Amino acid sequence: MSRHVRTVRRVVRGLVAVGMVGIGILHFVDPEPFVRIVPPFLPAPLALVYVSGVAEILLGLAILPRKTRRWAALGLVALYVAVFPANVYMAVAGIQLDPSSPMPGWIAWARLPFQLLFIAAALFVRHADPPPSSAARSARGSGDHEVGRDDSRAA
């Protein structure tokens, strides 16, 4: 894997983690907008908002360590699928997250495809970055690294 791909993966992983932890915290700080978009056929909207908030925080944190990354990413995919009905309900029923500051209806519809982007991001970052090969570590340590050599293939 190229150094560029590893760097992009780390940045995206950080963005996913910060985004998930941040939105998870919002589920507790201001749960009402989230309660509003829970479809009426689901029971206990506030409890579901709290459960999804906990899941978002835990999975956002778990995406960072190598040991939990793969399972956390798969958990995020499951979470994105699980909350999709709330996003659909929001668009279909014209629910406003903040009725005092309404957004145009098309924004709720435009949000729906972003679930696929979030799923793709979770799947992209699920791979653990391979540790540098022993040859790369010794070359870096001794200052003898060959210019142009791609050590990532050895991992």
Image (cartoon, rainbow, N blue to C red):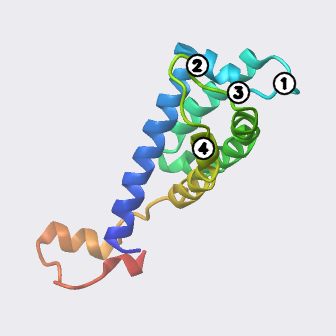
Question: Residue drawn at (40%, 80%), measured in percent from left and top?
Answer: 154
Which of pointers 3 and 4 indicates the residue nearer the eye?
4
The answer for how far apart the CA atoms under marks 2 and 4 are is 15 Å
Which of pointers 2 and 1 indicates the residue nearer the eye?
2
The residue identified by callout 1 is 40
Q: Position of residue 128 (x, y in %)?
A: 49, 58
Question: Residue drawn at (55%, 49%), measured in percent from left and top?
Answer: 69
Determine which quarter of the picture holds residue 14.
Answer: top left
Q: Secondary structure at mark 2?
A: loop
- Residue type at the position of mark 1: Pro
For disc 3, the neighbor class at 10 Å (few under 14, some 14 to 19, many from 20) is many
The answer for how far apart the CA atoms under marks 2 and 3 are is 12 Å
- Residue type at the position of mark 3: Ile
Q: Earlier in the sequence, mark 2 or mark 3?
A: 3
For disc 4, the neighbor class at 10 Å (few under 14, some 14 to 19, many from 20) is few
Q: Are marks 3 and 1 in contact (CB under 8 Å)?
A: no
Please state which of residues 40 and 150 is positioned toward the viewer in this rendering. Answer: 40
Q: Earlier in the sequence, mark 2 or mark 1?
A: 1
Instruction: Say if 61 sits above or below 127 in the image.
Output: above
The residue identified by callout 4 is 106
Asked whether residue 105 appears in the rendered view, the answer is yes
Instruction: Say if 56 sits above or below 2 in the image.
Output: above
Q: Name the disc covering residue 99, or none.
A: 2
